């Protein structure tokens, strides 16, 4: 079984580890991925007459390295809590960082390419609002032929929200 865990940093590691541990069997593989959109518009603003790393949409090797480093550094921060939790549970996982401005498509493409049997994602928006239909998770559920399991994010109690408002 191949399990693809797609995160933008909002998945609660303990819940994901518990779920994956229950599904894992010898021979299973686990990939923890995130989709990073590189702020190319910002990078293009840096493109001056003296320094044109993005001219004609062809990036120099140095610019490609900078983009790859940005994706790697940002991606590692987002997947690290889940990787650490899986490692502590004795479950080996491979990180994957995808440069994409369309996270739902990147998740589906990655799951298909890796022949995933299951996609695990976070539910970060309330389910009974119109906004939920714009979420990455719903887009993946609608377009994927691979089963998707949603793990709810950490909920805040009224007391937590009041404390945060008082201290903020």
Image: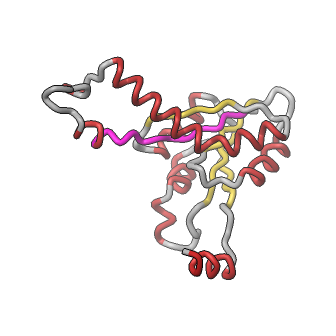
Q: Nearer the viewer, residue 133 or 78?
A: 78
Looking at the image, which residue sits at the far top? 61
Task: Please state the extent of the stretch shown in magenta in the rendering.
Answer: 30-41
Q: Nearer the viewer, residue 53 or 99?
A: 53
Residue occupying the point 77% across, 31% down: 92
Residue occupying the point 70% across, 44% down: 82
**Height in image: 131 above or below 149?**
below
Q: Quadrant of residue 32?
A: top right
Residue occupying the point 47% across, 29% down: 69
* Count of numbered labels shown in the rendering: 0
Residue occupying the point 55% across, 54% down: 137
The x, y position of residue 165, in whole percent, is: 57, 79
**Height in image: 36 above or below 123?**
above
- In the image, taking residue 87 as reference, residue 104 lies left or right, namely left
Q: Quadrant of residue 12?
A: bottom right
The x, y position of residue 60, in whole percent, is: 30, 19
- In the image, taking residue 86 as reference, residue 138 lies left or right, namely left
Quadrant, the N terminus: top right
The x, y position of residue 56, in whole percent, is: 19, 25
Q: Nearer the viewer, residue 155 or 111?
A: 155
**Height in image: 72 above or below 167?**
above
Quadrant, the C terminus: bottom right
């Amino acid at each position: 079984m191949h399990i693809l865990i797609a995160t933008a940093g909002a998945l609660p590691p303990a819940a994901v580890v518990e779920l994956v541990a229950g599904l894992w069997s010898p021979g299973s593989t686990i990939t923890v991925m995130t989709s990073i959109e590189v702020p190319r518009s910002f990078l293009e603003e840096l493109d001056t007459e003296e320094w044109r790393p993005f001219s004609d949409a062809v990036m120099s090797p140095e610019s490609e390295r900078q983009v790859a480093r940005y994706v790697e550094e940002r991606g590692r921060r987002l997947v690290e809590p889940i990787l650490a939790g899986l490692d502590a549970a004795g479950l080996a996982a491979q990180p994957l960082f995808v440069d994409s401005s369309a996270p739902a498509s990147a998740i589906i493409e990655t799951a298909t390419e890796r022949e995933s049997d299951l996609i695990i994602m976070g539910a970060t928006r309330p389910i009974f609002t119109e906004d939920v239909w714009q979420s990455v998770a719903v887009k993946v559920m609608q377009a994927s032929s691979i089963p998707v399991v949603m793990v709810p994010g950490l909920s805040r109690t009224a007391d937590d929200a009041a404390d945060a408002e008082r201290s903020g």
